[in-house]
Structures are given as structure tokens and as C-alpha cells.
Image (tube, rainbow, N blue to C red):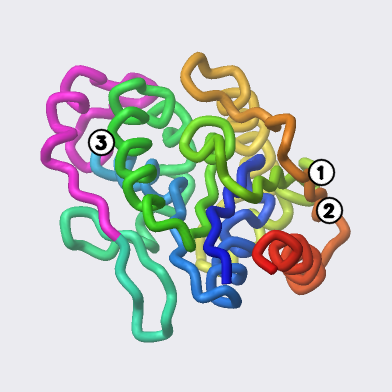
Amino acid sequence: MKCIIIAIDGYSSTGKSTLAKALAEKLAYAYIDTGAMYRAVTLYALRSGFVNKSTIDIEALKNSLIDINISFAISEDSKSEVCLNGEQIEGAIRGMEVSNIVSHISAIPAVRELLVAQQQQMGVAKCIVMDGRDIGSVVFPNAELKLFMTASEDIRAFRRYSELKSKGDQVSLEEVRSNISERDYRDTHREIAPLVQVADAIVLDNSNLTPDEQLNRVLKLVRTIIA
């Protein structure tokens, strides 16, 4: 059976990771959450004191990149979890503190250069599903299947708000909506590798799709390629 690279890009809170994880499980492919990698660097910057309110000490972060080791481990319930220097940080990177700064960190050229190189190395053997903002445009421009995921801002905000509340985070729906709007703007307007819908990407608007419906739709696309 043909082994391919599946590149999934799109706006925040569109369920990219949910789809990518399900696809990887169904196809027995490796799954890489590149957003988690940028969140890991963001968490490192926060913990190291490189972020002071809205100011980032870019030089200090650049000089510390050599000390950042990001890896993925499989949990006891078979879930992929991101690790920072050997520490499982999946829960620590999903809160609003990291969400509010990650777009700024991911726009730093040295950070993107480091992580893109790691991501491309992860895909050498193919049989991989990778999601993020620049997978089809920068990381794997020759991927056999490229998806671009979107949904209405209100639906995305409510999904993210529900997720955070279920984890016990004290946030308001308006705060989450504002964060999503700001991240959309920064992701699409940054100078380095902005979020774009490449010409050969298949658009998947899941505003009114269940996770199972979108998974089945994409599996049909995959099977036409690997058959």
C-alpha cells in the first residue's frame, strides 16, 4: 500500500488535531502536532522569564534554542503527548497563558527554522499526518494530500471555550473569541510562513460536521490516493 504525507493546515480551533489523530490511528501512521511544538517553545520562554507581559526577549530565546528538546511520547491510553526536555507538558501548553503568546513566538524566524527542520526530518519516511499552519505551504509543499480546515469564528470560539471549561479553566466566551480573532490575524499576516490556503489544498469547512463525518470524508480522499 502506498505511503503518503498528509498535511493539514487551518485556523485555530478547527479540530485539526482531532482529525489528524483519528486519521493517524485509522491508517497506522505517525501523528505530529506541530502546534504543540510551538506551544512547547512558548512554555519554555514563559518559564525562563523571556516573556514580560507583551514583550519577548527574542535574543535570549534564540540563544537558548539549543537547550530545547521537543519529543513525542505515547501515553498509556495510546495518545500522542508532547514532551519538553523529557517532561510531559500536554496539559501545561493548552491554557490561555500559552495561547495568548504562541502566535508571537511562532513568528520568530529562528524558532520556525529550528522546528521546520525537525518536522521535515520526521516526514522523511512518509506515513505521517502532520497538522499546523504551514505544513502544506512550507514544511511539505509536495505532500500527496493537503487539507485546509476552517469553520465559523463563533463555532470555533464555542468549541475552544467548552474545551477549556471542561478542564476547569476560568475563562469567558468573549475572552476566547478575542484570542481566536487575534491569533487568526497574526497567523495570516506574519512575514514568515503565514497561514495560507495553497492552491492544491482541499478545503474542509467543518462548521456543521461531526468529527466522524469529517473523518469519513477525508478517509475517502486518502483511499483514492493510496489505492
Q: Please report the residue visible at 23 percent of the width from the left and 54 percent of the height from the top.
A: 84
Marks 2 and 3, Cα distance to the nearest angstrom? 34 Å
Q: Is residue 53 above or below residue 213?
A: above
Magenta segment: 45-71
User: What kind of element bears circle 1?
Assistant: loop
Give amino acid for label 3.
Answer: Ala
| Residue for badge 2 | 207
Of 161 and 86, which appears nearest the observer? 86
Residue 63 position in % (x across, y down): 13, 25
Of 216 and 67, which appears nearest the observer? 216
Q: Please report the residue visible at 41 percent of the width from the left and 69 percent of the height from the top.
A: 80
User: Which disc is residue 152 wearing?
Assistant: 1
Q: Please report the residue visible at 61 percent of the width from the left and 28 percent of the height from the top.
A: 182
User: Which disc is residue 205 wearing?
Assistant: none
> Nearer the N terminus, badge 1 or badge 2?
1
Residue 175 position in % (x across, y down): 62, 41
Q: Is residue 50 above or below residue 88?
A: above
Give amino acid for label 1.
Answer: Ser
Q: Is residue 138 above or below residue 83?
A: above
Of 195 and 152, which appears nearest the observer? 195
**Side of 178 relative to 151 (left or right):** left
User: Which quadrant does the N terminus fall into?
Assistant: bottom right
User: Which disc is residue 45 wearing?
Assistant: 3
**Side of 99 relative to 124 (left or right):** right
Residue 9 position in % (x across, y down): 62, 43
**Are the residues flagged by discs 1 and 2 in contact, CB closer than 8 Å?**
yes
Q: Please report the residue visible at 58 percent of the width from the left and 54 percent of the height from the top.
A: 6
